[in-house]
Image (cartoon, rainbow, N blue to C red):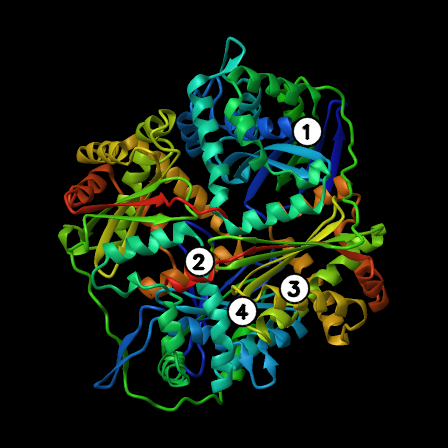
């Protein structure tokens, strides 16, 4: 596995050479600082830009080209990481060595840039039919979240957790904005995306970095401004007294979300101690503290999840529960979090080490996981694979206790299920 | 140890029988970091009625899944703890025809294989264990009830299938889950968790010879009490549909979804090879209704539907063609599909594209050890052969063959279902 970076002023090309896969990937990432309106528009652009262009006027023609050209997947994706938003166009294709056409790689790169830079535009607006179709699809998909208990509880918990616009934001907040957006306005957002973003191109797989660099240079046609490297990190304020909110719903299960601020972590803690914490509290499966407390000893739930948001410095614990058992579940989560401060067994600690080591090795069998590993090195300042393996051994039990003491409960949100609905079955 | 060559590739599968007669299938890739080890029981949620010798038994739906849960509790705690000590991860799942216990390992692969065999073959069940697990399984069952798409799918199965046990949820209903006893668990375990009814699939980076030695050594002294022949009673499906039209409402549903389902019996096709029939139908539907088709484009670009997909299903003798779409104009889309279905024929150009996609997917399959194992397990359950034939079938198909197979689909035997939003009270 080798990483090579080519700085081209306006954009950076990152080549991840790894020869254990039969697929390759190109990902073009446009990055800029968070802005709610741009976020909504850029998420629409992910679809518009992969559904049509002058050469392939509808998704049908793009799909036909993909099928004929051994392109496995071609899509756009949008995400917010701390205070930075990323709009990506991704193309996965078969390793050129399996394809007879000697120009296969070049043709694939050409296709990707063609689609991004040559959308169908009339009178400064996107193609009417495609625009309407995609807008309708997005609105329906976002409205559909109103029926999803997991989304509603998470989103409401985030809104109660912080006023930080980047952390509390969800595209669901922008349904009215999307509804009122015109094809001309969206085209204007497209021009912003192209001009104002910092562009990174990642090419991964069994590939020759020098050749890829030459091909990308030949076809790079994005007229963006110069490259800026952004800092993702942002924070939500602590609360002295945690906010607890219960809301009634007509769902058959209750959804519990508990959000903790994680304050002042060092880089060592973020990268090496936090995985121990997550493994011991939740990710070691049925033997972890949360599974033991909530599921195995009290049969309150089937699943419980814990996620640490590095860029926002907070940690979220979520579960869906038996109606009427919410307060008991909150007590048990608090107990697990408290136990993390001073009550970790050697077995749990060693188990966390093995689990992390195993999942790190496991990543090497996934091309997308290797790419994510590299994104974290480049964007997040994290260590490479070998340093990770070595440094992870240096973590001590007292490091985990120290980290556990940096957690502060901020918000408890319960979307309470309806016992009558549950009894209807 | 024998080798089975996989057509159109340099890949091969190693196979041998353990001393207990447990068949083992292995695919090796020394470029991978991980190994996937699975022990598969040929028993899933549909096996509620079975015979041992001449005696017939019936158990509640959901026993297979309940047993899968219970199996993780061993005399000295949780088996997952012991796998964790080896630096491995373990899981299990139950489907319609099989229960799979699996280990993901990049350390201690051979110890993990021994542990997998030893824990699955150890009979240890208590009443307390059964009672403690019930609440967890009920919560698992309840979590899908808040998902309107799942509720709609189950309603479709209930109306589409008359006889087949596929119509029942794998996990069982709340009533089933509450009924399951220690006796049911022991009966299923002793009848089906036997090497003649199981197989192992191992994929990834390991030494196949060493693996054979380890398994043979581990299994050489294992004994099973002889029992009479065990046979699941197959429930052959009928051509009837339970209804022509069904509708459900859900407070959790925001957008209307519809499902148009056609049912033809396998015996109505002239071609007698089930896999060829299903593959041919998948090809023609993909060409005529998939993302490359004019029909799909017409539907989406005119906002008649926001989502639209097709599928071909097979359940106990019934071949189903199914269209699922999100729409505000159910009747209009239904009419458009019916009209389109009347006179479709796949072209050479369309078939060529499908063959190219199939080749790309075939190449890619070997990138992922889990995908290789999943394909082997499915193929062993369905055809008792570890090598999936799909890519070869697609290579051999002609437009004439596909169109001939399609001509036997009964376009008059269909039903339409809708999932609609129910007005909510204030949340």
Q: Subunit of mark 2?
A: B
**Residue B25 location (% of width, % of height):** 45, 68
For marks 4 and 2, the one nearer the N-term is 2
Kindly give the residue lying farthest to the top in the view shown. A123
CA gap between label 1 and label 2 equals 36 Å
> Do badges 4 and 2 share one subunit?
yes
Circles 2 and 3: CB distance less than 8 Å? no
The residue indicated by pointer 1 is: A35
Q: Nearer the viewer, mark 4 or mark 2?
A: 2
CA gap between label 3 and label 4 equals 49 Å
Q: Callout 3: few (<14), some (14-19), or many (20+) C-alpha neighbours within 10 Å?
A: some
Circles 3 and 1: CB distance less than 8 Å? no
Quarter where residue A356 is shown: bottom right
Q: Nearer the viewer, mark 4 or mark 1?
A: 1
> Do badges 3 and 4 share one subunit?
no
**Residue B321 location (% of width, % of height):** 26, 46
Local SS, label 2: helix
The residue indicated by pointer 2 is: B144
Q: Subunit of mark 1?
A: A
Local SS, label 4: helix
CA gap between label 2 and label 3 equals 23 Å
**Residue A66 location (% of width, % of height):** 45, 32
The residue indicated by pointer 3 is: A330
Q: Nearer the viewer, mark 3 or mark 1?
A: 3
Q: Subunit of mark 3?
A: A
Closer to the camera in the image, B161 or A22: B161
Mark drawn on residue B208: 4
């Amino acid at each position: 596995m080798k990483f090579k970076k080519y700085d081209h002023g306006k954009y950076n090309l990152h080549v991840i050479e790894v020869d254990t896969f039969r697929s390759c990937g190109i990902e073009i990432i446009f990055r800029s600082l968070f802005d709610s309106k741009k976020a909504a528009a850029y998420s629409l652009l992910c679809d518009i830009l992969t559904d049509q262009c002058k050469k392939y006027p509808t998704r049908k023609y793009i799909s036909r080209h993909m099928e004929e050209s051994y392109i496995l997947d071609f899509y756009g994706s949008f995400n917010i990481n701390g205070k930075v938003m990323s709009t990506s166009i991704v193309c996965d294709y078969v390793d050129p060595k399996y394809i007879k056409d000697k120009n296969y790689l070049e043709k694939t790169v050409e296709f990707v840039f063609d689609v991004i830079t040559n959308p169908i535009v009339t009178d400064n607006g996107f193609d009417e039919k495609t625009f309407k179709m995609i807008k309708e699809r997005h609105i329906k998909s976002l409205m559909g979240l109103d029926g999803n208990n997991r989304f509603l509880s998470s989103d409401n918990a985030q809104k109660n957790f912080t006023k930080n616009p980047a952390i509390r934001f969800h595209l669901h907040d922008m349904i009215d904005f999307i509804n009122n957006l015109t094809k001309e306005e969206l085209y204007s957002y497209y021009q912003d995306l192209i001009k104002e973003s910092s562009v990174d191109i990642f090419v991964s797989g069994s590939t020759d970095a020098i050749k890829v660099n030459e091909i990308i240079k030949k076809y790079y046609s994005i007229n963006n401004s110069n490259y800026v490297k952004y800092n993702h990190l942002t924070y939500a304020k602590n609360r002295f007294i945690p906010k607890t909110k219960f809301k009634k719903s007509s769902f058959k299960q209750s959804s519990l979300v508990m959000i903790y601020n994680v304050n002042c972590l060092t880089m060592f803690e973020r990268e090496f101690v936090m995985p121990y914490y997550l493994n011991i509290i939740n990710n070691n499966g049925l033997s972890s503290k949360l599974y033991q407390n909530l599921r195995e000893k009290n049969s309150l739930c089937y699943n419980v999840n814990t996620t640490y948001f590095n860029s926002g410095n907070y940690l979220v614990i979520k579960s869906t529960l038996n109606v009427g058992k919410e307060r008991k579940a909150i007590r048990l989560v608090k107990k697990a979090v408290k136990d993390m401060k001073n009550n970790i067994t050697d077995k749990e600690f060693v188990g966390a080490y093995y689990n992390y080591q195993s999942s790190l090795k496991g990543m090497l069998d996934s091309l997308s996981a290797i790419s994510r590993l590299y994104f974290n090195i480049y964007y997040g300042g994290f260590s490479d694979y070998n340093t990770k393996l070595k440094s992870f051994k240096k973590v001590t039990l007292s490091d985990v206790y120290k980290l556990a003491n940096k957690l502060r409960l901020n918000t408890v949100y319960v979307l309470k299920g309806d016992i009558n609905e549950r009894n209807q079955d | 140890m024998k080798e089975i060559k996989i057509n159109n590739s340099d890949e091969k599968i190693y196979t041998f029988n353990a001393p207990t007669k447990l068949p083992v299938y292995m695919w090796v890739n020394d470029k991978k970091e991980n190994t996937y080890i699975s022990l598969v029981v040929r028993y899933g949620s549909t096996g509620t009625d079975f015979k041992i010798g001449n005696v017939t038994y019936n158990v509640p739906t959901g026993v297979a899944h309940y047993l899968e849960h219970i199996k993780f509790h061993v005399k000295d705690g949780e088996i997952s703890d012991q796998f964790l000590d080896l630096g491995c991860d373990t899981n299990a799942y139950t489907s319609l025809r099989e229960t799979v216990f699996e280990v993901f390992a990049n350390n201690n692969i051979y110890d993990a294989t021994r542990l997998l065999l030893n824990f699955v073959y150890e009979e240890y069940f208590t009443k307390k264990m059964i009672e403690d697990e019930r609440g967890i399984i009920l919560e698992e069952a309840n979590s899908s009830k808040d998902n309107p798409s799942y509720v709609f799918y189950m309603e479709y199965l209930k109306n589409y299938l008359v006889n087949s046990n596929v119509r029942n949820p794998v996990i069982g209903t709340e009533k089933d889950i509450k009924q399951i006893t220690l006796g049911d668990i022991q009966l299923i375990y002793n009848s089906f968790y036997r090497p003649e009814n199981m197989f192992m699939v191992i994929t990834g980076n390991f030494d196949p010879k060493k693996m054979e030695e380890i398994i043979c050594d581990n299994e050489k002294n294992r004994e099973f009490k002889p029992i009479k022949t065990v046979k699941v009673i197959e429930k052959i499906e009928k051509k009837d549909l339970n209804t022509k039209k069904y509708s459900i409402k859900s407070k959790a549903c925001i957008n209307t979804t519809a499902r148009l389902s056609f049912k033809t019996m396998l015996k109505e096709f002239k071609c007698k090879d089930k896999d060829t029939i299903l593959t041919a139908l998948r090809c023609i539907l993909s060409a005529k209704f998939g993302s490359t088709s004019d029909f799909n484009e017409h539907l989406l670009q005119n906002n008649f539907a926001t989502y639209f997909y097709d599928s071909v299903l097979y359940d106990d003798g019934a071949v189903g063609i199914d269209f699922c779409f999100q729409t505000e104009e159910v009747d209009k889309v239904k009419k458009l599909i019916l009209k389109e279905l009347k006179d479709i024929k796949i072209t050479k150009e369309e078939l060529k594209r499908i063959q190219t996609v199939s080749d790309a997917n075939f190449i890619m399959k070997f990138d992922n050890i889990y995908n290789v194992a999943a394909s082997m397990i499915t193929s062993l359950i369905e055809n008792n052969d570890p090598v999936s034939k799909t890519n070869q079938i697609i290579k051999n198909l002609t437009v004439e063959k596909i169109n001939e197979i399609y001509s036997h689909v009964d376009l008059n035997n269909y039903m339409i279902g809708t999932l609609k939003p129910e007005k909510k009270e204030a949340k």
